[in-house]
Amino acid sequence: GITSIGYSAFINCFNLSVANFFGNAPNMANHVFDSCAGDFRVYYNNGKTGFTNPWHGYRCLPMLPKKLFVKSSYESEGSTTPSGQVDIFTGMSTNISATPAIDCQFLKWTAYPTYNVRIINSDSPSTSVLSYNDATVTAVFVKTATITMKSSPIEGGATSPATGAHETQVGVSISITANPTAGYLFSGWTAEGTVTIADPRLSETTAEITGTAATVTANFKPEKIPAVLTMAADTDIG
């Protein structure tokens, strides 16, 4: 732990509003926190020794635990660790993790109020939070679905995503593209299952699955090649 802090160590740190001490009071030189934020204050772990109010001229208060509530957006879509209310001291870090249920994916963490807590990496299912006051942190999950891409006929062309099964998210639009091979033309998209194709007539469009699975087929037709009739005069006819 910290045992001493030098002269003017944090002077003119204008955005510094809180200093937390979790051990006993360190030896401190003069002017350490001068010209910090206007509401600057020191918090110490209750039960530790050497602190007074004021302490070296700075407002000094015992830490009081804040309430951090950790939950899932929908319990059926996943769980969190910890779950429910956690007591946390100002400025302390707490590890949190999210575990999606079957057929679900972790999407992100959200916080409310945002100014009371800092999520270190809101896109990671396992991360940590710094709490400055009472706050709620929520793990957001989304349901997953399977989209199967096909070409008809198979030799007529290719699709993007490639033919076969792909995992996607329910309610999220994905781009789909049909690329005909030489001698074929794209003739439209058809679908089976709970899916909406934005414009089935376009070779480049989007598909949105609203259920758990769907099949999307790119249809192709042979390209019609104009017949060429060549005529020649018969010079033997008088």
Image (cartoon, rainbow, N blue to C red):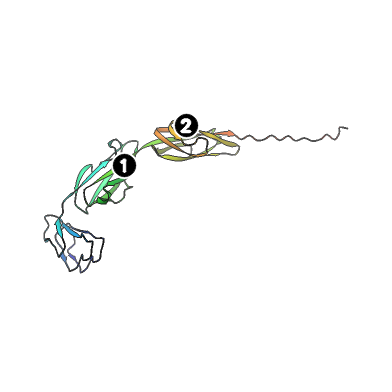
Q: Which residue is rendered at x = 20% and y = 45% of the image?
A: 86
In-image side of 112 versus 237 (left or right): left
x, y percentage for residue 237?
86, 32
The image quadrant where one finds the C terminus is: top right
Q: Quadrant of the N terminus?
A: bottom left
Q: Position of residue 76 (x, y in %)?
A: 29, 35
Q: Quadrant of residue 29?
A: bottom left
Does the rendering let one see residue 27?
yes
**Residue at x-position 52% and y-position 35%:** 201
Give me the C-alpha separation between circle 1 and circle 2.
30 Å
Q: Is residue 155 left or right of residue 36?
A: right
Mark 1 residue type: Val
The residue positioned farthest toward the front in the image shown: 38
215 w.r.t. 49: above or below: above
Q: Nearer the viewer, residue 216 or 10?
A: 10
Choose the circle earlier in sequence order: 1 or 2. Answer: 1
SS label for mark 2: strand
| 113, above or below 53, in the image | above
Residue located beneath label 2 in the image: 191
Q: Position of residue 169 (x, y in %)?
A: 39, 38
At x 58% / y 36%, what residue is drawn? 185
| Residue 59 picture location, percent across and down | 15, 60
Element type at mark 1? strand
Which residue matches tag 1? 140
Image quadrant assignment for residue 221: top right
Q: Residue furthest top?
A: 192
Task: Say what amino acid the circle numbered 2 marks.
Answer: Ala
In the image, residue 30 sits, relative to residue 130, either above or below, namely: below
Q: Locate residue 98 relative to residue 25 in the image: left or right.
A: right
Which is more toward the observer, 221 or 165? 221
Decide: few, some or many residues near mark 2? Use Cα within 10 Å; few <14, some 14-19, many ≥20: some
Q: Can see residue 161?
A: no
